[in-house]
Amino acid sequence: MAFLTAWWLPATTARRTQHVPLLDAWVVHLVASVSGAFLAFLLLASFHPQGFDHGVGWVCQNLTSVFPHDPVAAAFVMIVAIVSVEAGFAGLALLLAPWGAADEPLGASARNALRNAWLHTADALPWLLLLILLVSVLFDMRRKSDLAHPFSPSLPTLTTPTEDADTPENMERLAEYNRLVDKYFAEYRRQWKAYLASRPWLVRYADEIVEWAIIAAVIWILWAVMRAIGARRHVPPIIRPPVCEACGYNLTALPMEARCPECGEPVLNSLGPANRPGTAWEYRRERGRLRTWWRCSVDAAFRPTWFGRQLRVSTRVVDHRRFLVAHFVPFFIICYAIVPFADLIAGSGPESLRYDLCTVGPGFRITGATSSLLLALICAGDIGLLLGKVYRRNLIPAAMQVAAYLTGYLAFCTLVSVALGIMAYYMSWHRWFYDMERSWGLSRGVVSFFIWLVPSLAMPITYLVQLYKGTKGARYANR
Ligand SMILES: [Zn+2]
């Protein structure tokens, strides 16, 4: 069932399959992987320059030539490859585990991530089929169009000067020849461009279309897996004694007006109704999105311990995910702005700018935008594990919330780092830097690199410290 609905309705499927044993999920994954590998070979074949049919033969030939002589060695290599791919897959799944982690034993969060990642392996199949179809049709069209209208430039013939004596006439003839060569190539480029522009739209942009389809497939699959991992599921509640939120002392049977015998913190602060109201962002509908966004970003960055004591950990909270995802657009814009700006500085022409924005651009920018998510997942996983080991409690859900609310700070850091980079670049042209290079022998490039590097390194370190403090603020959470 997961085979058919997972890629379309990931959250619903995840809710229905939450009790599927891990072994069954793995078998689904295995079947999907084998079919996926088969389809991947077909996809590879469809990229063959002479067309899909030739490609299939070419792939088969290559595959059979790998296994001819030593079956034992071949089998060994196969097994090592499969085991490492499986390990990498499981590692990736565990990387996503903080997204759906709840107040539960650590193993339950890990099992949830593995189960859903395995069940969602089949999501790749429809995309692979689509890509095979797209690549073979588009590339076939291009082949046919190129055969029907080949590029045939009409260019003047050039005669190379033969005399090489150093007379003034010969020099002049050589200069004239060089001018002609320049003109020749300019004409060639002009005709090549005109030829490219004359091809049908689908043929002209075949590469770009395939690139965008691959990006769409990756985003779709990633999003489906994350929705599945984060889907609502049954989490048996953990019964804990009421503790002091400042020091963790057991407050059972103490009245509300009393103070903690260990550290003197009023019991009301730990068990009162005002304790852990949740973050401001959770009240965004009443108080306004922009205001609560600003409040959470500032609090998470500048008073993380206090912020950590506002979080609700035992109940299911998903607001922080929306907070994180909302930052994709600004991150995408920042990443989109970096390269054209660098081009502008480097003085490369509009041709390379167009190439950057349209061809290599999208994939790179989207990777930049999703790296904020990956960073949050990795850091939340690690800090949550580290603190969880110390306080014997699964602190990954708390760490994930803090990491999500720190995304605003991360975006700010990226902006500052970019601005610093541009500033350092311009500074290196200043007179002082030339003076410094002359008098102290310090390279301009190295100095400006350090002017950028030191603050840029300080920012991820402060990010980790804030995440640590915020997560620690949730270590004795009563709710
Ligand atoms: Zn206490």
Image (tube, rainbow, N blue to C red):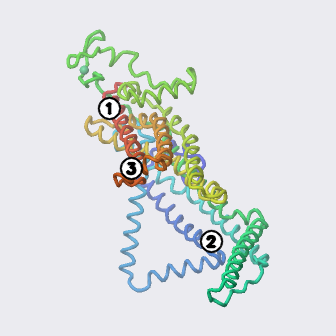
| Residue 436 numbered mark, or none | 3
State which quadrant residue 103 falls in. top left
The earlier-in-sequence mark between 1 and 2 is: 2
Foreground tag (1 vs 2): 1
Give the side of residue 107 with respect to residue 2, left or right.
left
Q: Residue at x 57, y 45 (%)?
A: 332
Q: Residues at badges 3 and 2 in contact (C-beta under 8 Å)? A: no
- Graded by Cα atoms within 10 Å as few (under 14), some (14 to 19) or many (20 or more), the crowding at tag 2 reads many
Q: Earlier in the sequence, mark 1 or mark 3?
A: 3
* Residue 140 in the image, given as x and y percentages of width and height: 71, 72
Q: The residue tagged with tag 3: helix, strand or loop?
A: helix
Q: Point out the quarter of the image occupied by ligand 1.
A: top left
Indicate which disc residue 46 carries: 2
Disc sitting over residue 229 in the figure? none
Q: Contact, CB < 8 Å: mark 1 with mark 2?
A: no
Q: Amino acid at mark 2?
A: Ser
Looking at the image, which residue sits at the far front? Answer: 168
Queried on whether the Cβ of the residue with tag 1 lies below 8 angstroms from ligand 1, the answer reads no
In the depicted structure, whether residue 53 falls above or below residue 89: below
| Label 1 residue SS | helix
- Residue drawn at x 26%, y 34% is 391
Tag 1 residue: 472
Cα distance in 3D space between marks 3 and 2 = 58 Å
Mark closer to the observer (1, 3): 3
Given residues 348 and 473, the one toward you in this image is 348
Of the numbered discs 3 and 2, the one sitting upstream in the chain is 2
Q: Position of residue 297 (x, y in %)?
A: 47, 30
Question: Label 3: how many residues lie within 10 Å, few (<14), some (14-19) or many (20+)?
Answer: some
Q: Amino acid at mark 3?
A: Met
